[in-house]
Image (cartoon, rainbow, N blue to C red):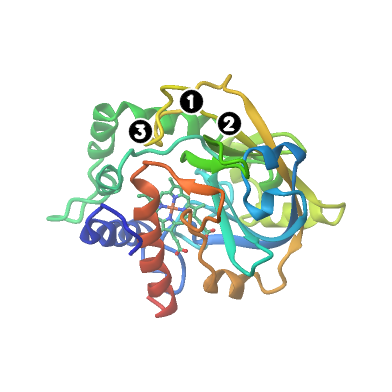
Amino acid sequence: MSGSTTPGTAIAQIVQTMRALAGSHPGFRPVHAKGCVCYGTFRGAREARGVSRAPHLQGDAVPTVIRFSNASGDPDVHDGTPNARAMAVKFQLPDGKKADILALSIEGFPARTPEDFLAFLQAQLPDPATGQPRPDAFPRFLEKHPSTAAFIQRLTQKPVPASYGQSSYHAEHAFKFTAADGTSRFGRYHWMPEAGEAHLSPDDASKRSANFLREELESRLRNGPVVFRLLLQLAEQGDPMDDVTALWPADRPQVELGRLEVAGISQTSMADERGMVFDPTNLTDGIDLSADPIPPARSAAYSISYDRRGKGE
Ligand code: HEM
């Protein structure tokens, strides 16, 4: 466990509840089960050096591994199913270490703390006594949690991306960035697709092939790399650092940190993803966590999930 203040039992319960909601799929993640591992190159922008001394932000080309995924825990989910999509990026640093950025296609998150996230998941479970669905439980949860309802509302506006390469992705938490001269500031990462954003209605998306996102990516990559710009939205006085449900004002200044070129899909994507963990606490000198309670709990949850996957659970 990685210094999380959340009790280990609550973290284990989250992973267990995710598994209960998704059903048994041994060897797969209990969420983000359907993925596609790609390789590419990131190069830091000139302005990035003024923000952080992190090695991958100094302007040199850095090899990266990228995993696109659907948030569902079902590895066979139809790609047209409305849900958040994700892009997880692992930077292979010159010193042999790794740094990760995990990001979702919807801004914010449905819960502010790990305990709230557990309650959010449990509200979707059937009645433990009868095993029957509880159609009122989730709407009741949303009534009591307006920031969760706001997240769901944002999801309905971008239910299905037309392409993994035509969605923005947001790392949600605030991180602290320190430059070589010792100055620090807080910011939130956003990946913006150079091809622009495009979304489908659930109806149109359901008519496409079950794996259309991967197929579309394969065909897009035949014409050249899929490119994302990494932007950092800078916090101003009073912006919350510890509340992933609260978006910062859209007019906060942004600094371009660099450009990611996704070059191709790994030939061993399936095997790669089983052996890999992306973790928001995999950081490097020049980037630190904020006071947000979620990332340390995520790290612990991702370890549990990885262990179970390795055991074929
Ligand atoms: C308490 C909060 C959270 C918990 C307990 C949690 C739990 C999990 C677990 C168990 C996995 C599977 C990991 C693995 O087996 O490798 C996962 C994957 C993932 N989570 Fe979370 N999560 C949380 C919050 C978030 C947030 C706020 C984000 C926003 C960026 C996020 C983004 C992702 C992504 C992108 C993946 C897929 C990573 C990959 O491709 O391997 N999660 N999460």
Amino acid type of the residue that numbered disc 3 sits on in the rendered structure: Thr
Q: Nearer the viewer, mark 3 or mark 2?
A: 2
Q: Residue at x 37, y 41 (%)?
A: 291
Query: Badge 2, how many Cα within 10 Å: few under 14, some, many 20+?
Result: many
Q: Residue at x 55, y 42 (%)?
A: 177
Instruction: Indicate left or right for 11 with 164 as reference.
Output: left
Where does the image place residue 212, in percent across and percent down from the top left?
67, 53
Whichever of labels 3 and 1 marks the residue nearer the N terminus, that label is 3
Query: Where's the N terminus, which quadrant?
Result: bottom left
Q: Is residue 271 above or below residue 14?
A: below
Secondary structure category for the residue under label 3: helix
Where does the image place residue 289, in percent across and percent down from the top left?
44, 47
Marks 2 and 1, how far apart at CA: 9 Å
Instruction: Indicate left or right for 67 with 10 as reference.
Output: right
Q: Which mark is residue 248?
A: 1
Whichever of labels 2 and 1 marks the residue nearer the N terminus, that label is 2
Where does the image place residue 50, in percent across and percent down from the top left?
67, 38
Whichever of labels 3 and 2 marks the residue nearer the N terminus, that label is 3
Can residue 288 be seen at all in this image of the molecule? yes
- The residue beneath circle 3 is 148
Amino acid type of the residue that numbered disc 2 sits on in the rendered structure: Gln
Secondary structure category for the residue under label 1: loop
Can residue 229 be seen at all in this image of the molecule? no
On whether ligand 1 comes within 8 Å of the CB at mark 1, the answer is: no
- The residue beneath circle 2 is 233
Secondary structure category for the residue under label 2: strand
Is disc 3 in contact with disc 1, using a CB cutoff of under 8 Å?
no
